[in-house]
Image (spheres, rainbow, N blue to C red):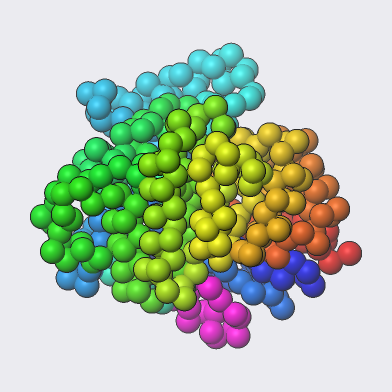
Amino acid sequence: MTSPHEVCLWVTPKIFDDLRAPEDGVAAFFDHHAEWIDGNDLTIVFCAGNGDHVLDWRGPDGLDDTFDWARYNAYAWDPDTGQTFETAMRNHNANWLDRVREGGERSANPYSAGPMMVLSEQELDYRSLAHIYATIREEAQRRSVRLRLLEYLEPGPEFCRSEWKTIRHPEVAAARADAGGHEIPGLIDVTLPLNADSRSYAGWPDGIPEGTLAGEFVARQTAAFVADFALDGVLLGNQFGLLGFWNPKNAPELTVERQEGIRRFFLGLRDAMGDRQIYWMDSYWRADVERDVWGMTDECYDALDAIVVSTFAVLVERTEIIPNLQSKARMRARTLYAVDFVDPWYAYRTHLDDIRSYQYQREVLRSHRDLTDGVTFFANDTFGQFVPRERLEETRRLLTA
C-alpha cells in the first residue's frame, strides 16, 4: 500500500482463547494482517470494553482489580428496569426470534444486532490487560513494525457493563443510547458537573471535588491511564463530547454554555495528553454540521491528531460520505477512512448483509483515496474471528492499483 500509508485496526479481547496467555492470538493477528501492515504505519486500537475501565482505573495499586469487558454480543441490559441480566437477555432474544427468524426481518435492529449472548466467562483484570498491551508491543518490535497502540474510550453504555457511568456517576451519564435495539442509560455529557466522589482515581488521587465538569475528569483520568500503561494514545469513539448520537435531530439545544463545555473538554484533553495521540471518531456528518448543530469548533478539531471519517453501514447517510470526507481532509488532523467488514460487538457482516453499502464505501475509497491518510476497520467479528482474507484482499487492492 503506497498511499494512504496508515492502517488503523480495531481489535478486542475476543481474539484470545486465554486472556492471560495472549501470545498466540497476537501472533495470529499480525500474521493475518501482514499484507496490510507491510510498509505502513500500524495503529492498533485495543477495545477492551467500552472505556469504563479507563474511567474506573485507580492507579498501580489497582492492577488486580477486575472489570467487565466486551465479551457479549448485543449487550443491552438496563438494570433500571428491574430486570435481571438473564431476563433482559431472554426478552431480547425472544424479540429477535419473533422478528428476524420467524418474521423474516432483514434491516436495522434487531436483525443487525443479532441475539444477545455471552461469548466468554473469563475474568479480565488490569494486570492481564497490561500483559496484552506488552505482548502486542513485543510482537510489533520483533517484526520491525512501526506501531501506535491506543485504548478505546466510548461515551456510551454499549458492549459491556458500565460501573462508572451507570453506578458511580449517572448524574453526568443519564442520557440514553441505542445498544442492540434497546435504549439504555450511560451516555456521558462532558458539560455536566459531577457529584463529589471520595474514591481515589489515577488522575484524581484525592477524589473528585463537587462540581468538577465530567469533561475535566475524563481528560485527566484518560491521560493518567494512557501514561500508566505506556500507551501511545486514545481513540474517542462515537462522537465523544458531542451529545446526541449519529443524527443532527438527536442533538440537544446548542447553548453558549454547552459549546464552552465541549471546547474545555477537547482543549483540556489535549493539554493533559501532551504529545500522546488523540484519535476521534466523528458523527458521520460533515464538519459544518458538527459545528452548527453539535457545537464542535476549529479549536476542538485542532486538538486532534486523527479523525475517523465514519462510514459504518448500519448508521451512515450514504450521501454524506463524500462531503464528510472532503470536510475532514481540510483539517490539521490526519483523516482515516473507515471501511466495513464485520462488527466486534454485533452479529451483522456488512459484506453479506448490506452489500450496496459495502460496495459504495469502496467506490468512494477508490475515487477519493487522495483525501485520506489511512484506512481503519474492525479487525475481528463478534465471535473473535478475523475478517476473511478474501474480503481483506479485495479492499487492499483498491489502494495498490
**Residue 10 quadrant:** bottom right
Residue 31 percent location from the top left of the image: 62, 71
- Residue 222 in the figure: left or right of residue 95: left
Q: Is residue 126 left or right of residue 144?
A: left
82 lies above or below 221: above
Q: Residue at x 54, y 51 (%)?
A: 297
Image coordinates for residue 191, horizontal then vertical, percent: 35, 44
User: Can residue 318 be seen here?
Assistant: yes
Using the image, determine if residue 376 lies above or below residue 117. below
The vertical placement of 103 against 187, above or below, is above
Q: Eyeballing the image, is 127 above or below 345?
A: below
Residue 143 magenta: yes
What residue range appears in magenta?
A: 135-150
Confirm whether residue 156 shows in the render.
Answer: no
Q: Nearer the viewer, residue 180 or 299?
A: 299
Give x and y (percent) for residue 106.
64, 24
Membership of 272 in magenta stretch: no
Residue 267 picture quarter: bottom left
